[in-house]
Image (spheres, helix red, strand yellow):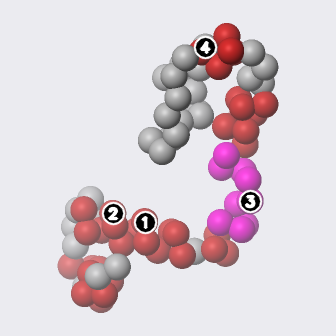
Amino acid sequence: MNRKWLNNEKNHAENSDEKKIINLYKNTLNIYARNKQGIGPIKGMLEELRNIKTIDDLSELTLESKVESPLIEFSL
């Protein structure tokens, strides 16, 4: 993280790339908020994954699915 950005955070527009990076950095470090939320934010994804029993179930995941990740790619 560029300390210059952190020190001058108020000088960046709310929707600027710099502000987004600063917010991501701060959220990543905020373990207290993450611990307080627990698994709540991903409960929907976990439920969808639990409901997958067959290849057909897997292939029926739609674009509206809560299960998505740019880091995990699969195909049938």
- What amino acid type should be assigned to the residue bearing mark 1? Leu
Is residue 71 positioned above or below 6 on the image? above
Q: Is residue 23 toward the left or the right of residue 43 in the image?
A: left
- What amino acid type should be assigned to the residue bearing mark 2? Lys
Question: In terms of secondary structure, where does tag 4 sit?
Answer: loop
Of tags 4 and 3, the one toward the viewer is: 4
Question: Dividing the image into 4 quarters, which one contains the N terminus?
Answer: bottom left
Question: In terms of secondary structure, where does tag 3 sit?
Answer: loop
**Residue 41 lies in magenta, yes or no?**
yes
Residue at 78% across / 19% down in the picture? 53
> In this orientation, which residue lies closer to the viewer: 58 or 36?
58
Real-space CA distance between mark 3 and mark 1, rounded to the nearest whole angstrom: 18 Å
User: Which disc number belongs to residue 10?
Assistant: none
Question: In terms of secondary structure, where does tag 1 sit?
Answer: helix
Is residue 62 positioned above or below 41 on the image? above
Residue at 29% across / 82% down in the picture? 2
User: Which disc number belongs to residue 38?
Assistant: 3
- What amino acid type should be assigned to the residue bearing mark 4? Glu
Query: Which label's residue is closer to the chain start, 4 or 3?
Result: 3
Question: Dividing the image into 4 quarters, which one contains the C terminus?
Answer: top right
- What amino acid type should be assigned to the residue bearing mark 3? Gly
Which residues are the magenta region?
34-42
Query: Which label's residue is closer to the chain start, 4 or 1?
Result: 1
Reading the image, the residue beneath label 1 is: 24
Reading the image, the residue beneath label 4 is: 60
Dominant SS in magenta: helix
User: Which disc number belongs to residue 20?
Assistant: 2
Real-space CA distance between mark 2 and mark 4, rounded to the nearest whole angstrom: 33 Å
